[in-house]
Amino acid sequence: MRYTRRHIRPNITPLQDTLLRQCRSDYREDYTTINADKNLGQCYVKTEHLTERGVSEHLGNQEVYQRLTETAAHSFQRGFEMIFDGFITKCQNAKISKAEITYLVRGRNQRKGKLARFYMTAKMHKTVQI
């Protein structure tokens, strides 16, 4: 079965798309593009603001996150990678397609040593139309 990519109509004009691309390249270090919640597209945020909010509101919350030493973090990471490698080996012995095995192996290789990720979305508030 061959996959055919379907065309999706963008929800922004070509001019808006060009402006976003230009801003991303010109202000790469000062601003970051992040996704908005509720499937509302992308937001352009000062990187410094995003980092401060991420740490103060999320990563700094000791009820949710436990601070690890670098050694402990690497140990957990390596342990997970070993478990995932074992899973891939079991999949190779099972009856799943070669394409599925390729997907798992590529995913592991692309994120090797960096499987954990933290990202934020911008909270959007919709106004009610009466």
Image (cartoon, rainbow, N blue to C red):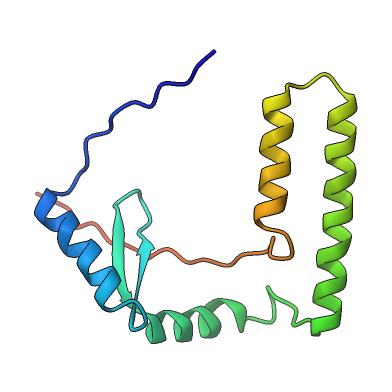
Q: Is residue 16 above or below residue 57?
A: above
Residue 20 picture location, percent across and down: 22, 63
Residue at image x 61%, y 79%?
59
Q: Nearer the viewer, residue 50 or 30?
A: 30
Q: Is residue 102 above or below residue 49?
A: above
Q: Which quadrant of the rendered structure holds the N terminus?
A: top right
Residue 119 picture location, percent across and down: 52, 66
Q: Is residue 65 above or below residue 20?
A: below
Residue 16 picture location, percent across and down: 14, 57
Image-quadrant location for residue 73: bottom right
Residue at image x 68%, y 73%?
64
Image side of residue 10 versus residue 107, left or right: left
Residue at image x 50%, y 16%?
2
Residue found at the very far top of the displayed protein: 1
Q: How many marks?
A: 0
Image-quadrant location for residue 34: bottom left
Residue 128 picture location, percent across and down: 17, 53
Residue at image x 54%, y 83%?
55
Q: Nearer the viewer, residue 41 or 123?
A: 41
